[in-house]
Structure formats: C-alpha cells, structure tokens
Amino acid sequence: MDDIHIPLSSPDITDAEIDAVVDVLRTRHLSLGPKIPEFENAFRRYLGVEEAVAVSSGTAGLHCALLAMGIGPGDEVITSPFSFVASANVIKMVGATPVFVDIESSTLNMDAAKAAKAITPRTKAILGVEAFGNPNGMHEMVMLAASHEIPLLEDACEGLGSSHKRRKVGTFGRAGVFGFYPNKQITTGEGGIIVTDDRKIADLCRSFRNQGRDPNGSWLSHARLGYNYRLSDINAAMGIVQMQRLDDIVTARQRVAHEYISQLLDEPRLILPTIDDETVMSWFVFVVRLTSEFDAADRDAILAYLKNHHIGCSNYFPPIHLQPFYVADHGFKRGDFPITEYVADRTIALPFHNRLSHMEIERVVHHLRQALEQRLSAKAA
Ligand SMILES: Cc1ncc(COP(=O)(O)O)c(C=O)c1O
C-alpha cells in the first residue's frame, strides 16, 4: 500500500469529457468552430460578465489583456512576488517593468498598504493574484486601482469558483484571466480565458489571439501584431463539460481540504491555510507552512522524505524575484521581499485532487508527521 504513488495533482476526467472530445473529432470543426463560443458563454453565465475570450493558456490570456490595456515599455505594473512565474513574465513580455510588492502573511496576497506606497507616476496597472485561490485582499486592490484611475488585471488562474464578500473571482478587475492546465480546478489540457465587461478589451483580445485579425476582417488581413493564442474546439469541448461539473468539483475539493484541516489541526509544527468567514474557497492546491523552528533546508528534507514515501509534493512557490532570470535582469536579492521569502522557504504543497480518499489523506498526514519528527530529532542531535 505504502509504495503506491499519491500524485500531487490529478485531473478529474469522466466519460462525459471523453465523449465530448470524441464528438468534436467526428466533425470538421477542430478549431474556430462552435465549441469556442459555447465554452465562452458558459463563463459569461457563470460569472455574469459581458465578454469572455478563450485562449490557449492562462499566460496567453494575461499577455493579451495587458496588451489590450495598452501597457508597454516605460510602464510599471504592480504585482506579487509570491506567485507562479507567469504572472510577472507577462509584464516583461509587453516590455513593462514588474514592481513587486511584498505579501501579507495570512492571505499570502499583496499587502494593500505596501502596494499603495509602490505606486509612482509610471504605474499603469495592478496585476493582482489570488494565491492558491484565496481572493482575500482583492477588494483592497479594486479600491487602490480605482483611486489611481488605473486598471486592475486579475490573475484569477488559481481561483475559479472562489468568492469574497459574494463577489466571484474573475469579476474584481477591469479584466480577469483563468488558466486550465491539468492541475487547475477545471482543465482543458491547456487553455485559458479572459473575462471582462469591457467590449474594447475583449475585441482587442480576440484580435491578439488570432494573429491580429479584426473580428470581422478577412483571413489574410492583419490589423495589428498578433499571436496564435487560439484554443481548439477539442480543448473547449472538454472545458464545457468541466464547467457543467464545476460546482461538484469545488465541493469535492472543499471536502479534501477540510479533511486535511481536521486531521492536521492539532499539529503544532504546521501553519494551516486560514480562510475568513467572508470567503468561499475553491481550493487550487493545499499548502501547509512550517513553523519558525524550521528553515528552507528542513522543508527540502521533508519534501524528500515524502517523495521517498511515494507522496507527491512541492515547494509552491519559490519567490519570483529570486528566480535566476529576475536576479540577472533586475538585480533582485534575498531580503528584498522578506515576508514572501520567509513564507516561500517553508511551504509544502500536499497531494490535492478531487478524488483523494480518506485513506490517502491519512497516509499523507502520517508520513508528514513522521517527517517533521525526524527533522526535529536530526536538528536536536
Ligand atoms: C497564478 C498563475 N498565473 C498564471 C498561470 C499561467 O497559466 P498557464 O499555465 O495556463 O499559462 C498560472 C498557472 O499555472 C498561475 O498559477
């Protein structure tokens, strides 16, 4: 039993998704077909937004949205260093400068007071991230962006299904972007979507995703520099079924998260995720944090121990500003964003997916406790 691998994540694909994909394969419309507007409409209905533009990845969606907001060279965009690298990379991709703001240690999202201090005359947007799906703090970003009359772009890639004070993730910003890589709440294999109430932004995104063509222009006329960021109908067909199942998926993930929390509540060597009463959490991953008696070397030893026991785990996320590319390009160093660094040194993402069983969670918790014990003994010796 103990040598069966428990993966860090696993997509939840049923016969309905498989049938939907096969149905598309039997048609002539593998791309630019009817599944794209159907998938986009599912998002418009779910979020109550005017526009949705499906693209080939979350990164592509963020890139298009920044371009559509007119962000470019010379501009600064405020964002979090505690995220997946793509949320800062897209700022670099449009030639602008990411201005990192340290996080708040309970929500793991940008600290609003620090974000306010980081604004300069060159700040042209805020790119807010819901770390691990937690929207707490996004209302503050909405207010900050409004008070400076700059757009908020919501990197909602980790938060489909979450809400805060009844406002759904994806509807906080001038535009929001979701991603559908297989570890996400819903997957299309690869894929993403931009959601907005702003028709101009949506139309520009439609053009950027399709080689710069205007929506009603001819196939060989290119009005602006564009990309091939189209999603195929094969991917969209999978996404349509996943969207129909979203409520059940969110509930299943909440069940797994609550089970982890109840099994780990008495563990003094861990800090569990804290979710406030006004947040409905759609869990992207389940990340625990080590207490201050541990450091990054301890965390890495614990990850190695778990992997040796066939338990998938990871250090989500190393700080973006300390990624080699950002150190080389911007001269960032350790100490620049101390809360992000302190948190990132101690995070452990545990196996997390819709069908994780009670017994599997027990096994993960058992080995995690053993790993903590062993590490403390090794330090004391
Ligand atoms: C916060 C965040 N932003 C952006 C992305 C990029 O999404 P994709 O992998 O679909 O390009 C991800 C996905 O991993 C993410 O977690």
Image (tube, grey):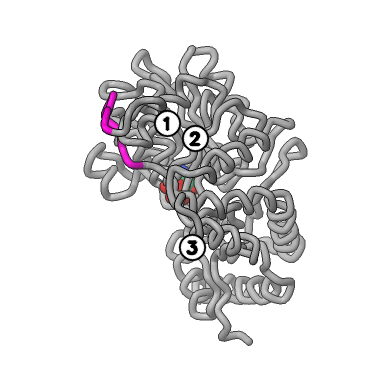
Q: Nearer the viewer, residue 44 or 130?
A: 44
| Badge 2 vs badge 1, beta-carbon distance below 8 Å | yes
Count of picture labels: 3
Q: Residues within 10 Å of mark 2 (few under 14, many from 20)?
A: many
- SS at badge 2: strand
- SS at badge 3: loop
Which quadrant, please, contains the N terminus?
bottom right
User: Which corner quadrant of the image does residue 333 belong to?
Assistant: top left
Which numbered dot is residue 32?
none
Instruction: Determine which residue is flagged by label 3.
Output: 314
- SS at badge 1: helix
Q: How far separated are the C-alphas under marks 2 and 1?
A: 6 Å
Q: Nearer the viewer, mark 3 or mark 2?
A: 2
The residue positioned 30% from the left and 28% from the top of the image is 96
Residue 249: image x %, image y %? Answer: 69, 55
Dot 3 amino acid type: Ser
Q: Nearer the viewer, residue 1 or 290?
A: 1
Q: Is residue 224 magenta?
A: yes
Instruction: Determine which residue is flagged by label 1.
Output: 206
Residue 326: image x %, image y %? Answer: 29, 43
Is 341 above or below relative to 365?
A: above
Q: How far separated are the C-alphas under marks 3 and 1?
A: 35 Å
Residue 283: image x %, image y %? Answer: 64, 51
Q: Nearer the viewer, mark 3 or mark 1?
A: 1
The residue positioned 60% from the left and 25% from the top of the image is 50
Q: Is residue 293 visible?
A: no
The residue positioned 38% from the left and 38% from the top of the image is 88
Q: Is residue 245 magenta?
A: no
Instruction: Determine which residue is flagged by label 2.
Output: 53
